[in-house]
Image (tube, grey):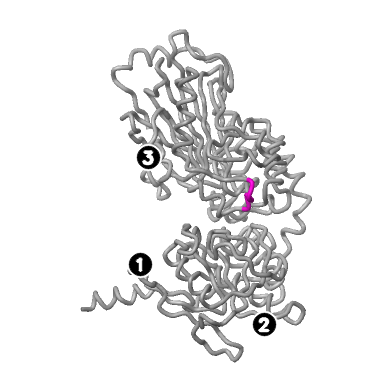
Amino acid sequence: MRITHPTRLAPLLLVATAAILSVSHAQTVTNDGWLNLTVIHTNDIHARVDPANEKGFNCSDDDKKNGTCYGGAPRHQTLIQKLRKGKTSLLLDGGDEFQGTLWYNYYKGDVASQIMNALGYDLTTVGNHEWDNGVATLAKFWNQLKMPIVCANCVVSEETLLKDLVKPYHIFEDLGIAIIGYITPTTGATSNAGPTVSFTDPIPAVQKCVEELEAKGIKRILALSHHGYENDKVVAAQTRGIDLIVGAHSHTFLGDSKNPLSKGPYPTVIKNQAGEDTLIVQAYYMGRYVGNLDVVFDPQGKIVQYEGAPIQVDQTIQPDPKLQAQVDTWRQKFESWSTKVLGKATADFDFTRCKNDECSTGNLIADTMLKCAKDARSVHGPHPDLAIIQSRVIRAAIPQGQVTAEKVLTTIPYDNVIIQMPMTGQVLLRTLEAVTIRRHKDTNKNVTSPIQVSGLRFTYDSSLSVMENHIKTATIQDRQGRWVAINPQTTYQVVSTYFLWNGGDNIFGKLDSDTVNLGDLGKAVMDYIESVGTITPYTDGRIFDVKHISNVKRRRW
């Protein structure tokens, strides 16, 4: 989209014809204060070092033949160098370089940092998944980066490993531009950031930075966000002084409305508290697109012209040979392990339904957890009754065909330790209620993920008000295979993960019960598939919203 304020057209044409002498950024602000800038941006790469198909898996021969093979760091290098040539530009990343493929499982952040340095990023913020393996892994990653890291609402003053590595904003003195970083404040609940780090409301944190920057005479202010498209619109509307928000986290494609992926225009324009325009951009995820926005700042620091669109990183873009050679070398270290065939899937497992309902991938994982606990019961004690896992742990779906280690760990990429713990029926019922209303009444905190279960069935009514009991039935399968109602006074043995036991996603709240460690979740799923050979996706009504029945009855009436 190209937009120009008509009253500014003459000086803009003058600026547009001015010679830009360098790649990246240099002293390019004209004597009368005008600035042409290209903002190139990526977000939510999720460890896609290699090209990926539309589902995020490594490209097959058919994908390549059909032209549905996208992204990859070497192609990014080629495209970014082309976009920066002869322009004043900033290359920004919105976070979530971590998690998603075996590249992360094997290397953690070591390869991501080298790629970001090679691509020449000018600035990055932090995504929620950068915290998944704790502050030590994140600190190592940040120490390897050659660009500043910004996050205004990350409170790290009590964390010695991080406090000197991140700052609220960075000023590019030669451009007279400052960029403020911020992250979704739910990160503390959804990651392993730990007790020494907290995340505040981004709106006051960002506005405070704007006021500090204005006091320093900075007129051109951008934000680099990992908070999601809808939330960025709220931040834009409830602050002032931000010219452009470069977003991430929600994996949103903005652009041509004819593209079925599109969720809005590129850029999206929001009126801020002062009645001025704030632009918002985002570039999908997995490296399939690179965002590219040309803007013109007037002498008052306002964007008065903009034009751009996300560029699809498809097979017409040749990979940079030097970076490709390095990627090939890195890959050799884990390729034989990652391509090991564990078994066969008779059909595609489901991923999209996992965000709200029972899904076949969730059933596979939860059933594996419960089986793992039952197999270990002679060694580790009491018989396990049921398993609960957060849906958010599922990041992809196992496709039909051969199942490899890579496909399993792309589906469940997080490091999760399976544990078994005692839980009363009363706590269990309150947990199910909290999950259905997305808020835990005991802790007064939002629940940030639905669940998948095994050995448990429950029905609920989502049409009821928050004050009513949503759980209609809740049963577990006893040792004779009978489904019996959960007794609030009975203590059950629940199989879950250390992350949830420790308060993750606010599903259980913080528990203080003893736990038994049953090993790594990813390994358990791989071992199970290898032992049975063939897996078939299925659902069996473990979780059901009775609202659907009520709606059918009302329509018939």
Left/right of residue 445 with respect to residue 385 in the rendered view: left
Quadrant including the N terminus? top left
Instruction: Kindly check if marks 3 and 2 are in contact, taking CB atoms under 8 A apart as contact.
Output: no
The residue where tag 3 is placed is 265
How crowded pointer 2 is (Cα within 10 Å; few <14, some 14-19, many 20+) is rated as some
Q: In which quarter of the image is residue 395?
A: bottom right
Q: Residue at x 43, y 44 (%)?
A: 229
Q: Main secondary structure of the magenta part?
A: loop
**Residues in magenta?**
192-196
Marks 3 and 2 sit apart, C-alpha to C-alpha, by 54 Å
Q: Residue at x 33, y 69 (%)?
A: 464
What is the x, y in percent for residue 119? 64, 33
The residue where tag 1 is placed is 467
Which secondary structure, mark 1?
A: loop
How crowded pointer 1 is (Cα within 10 Å; few <14, some 14-19, many 20+) is rated as few
Which secondary structure, mark 2?
A: loop
- The label shown at residue 383 is 2
Relative depth, front residue between 30 and 245: 245
Residue type of the residue flagged with mark 1? Met
Residue ranking furthest to the top: 31
Tell me which label, 3 or 2, sits earlier in the chain.
Answer: 3
Tell me which label, 1 or 3, sits earlier in the chain.
Answer: 3
Q: Quadrant of residue 508?
A: bottom right
Marks 1 and 3 sit apart, C-alpha to C-alpha, by 39 Å
Judge whether 481 appears above or below 437 on screen: below
Residue type of the residue flagged with mark 2? His
* Residue 170 visible: yes
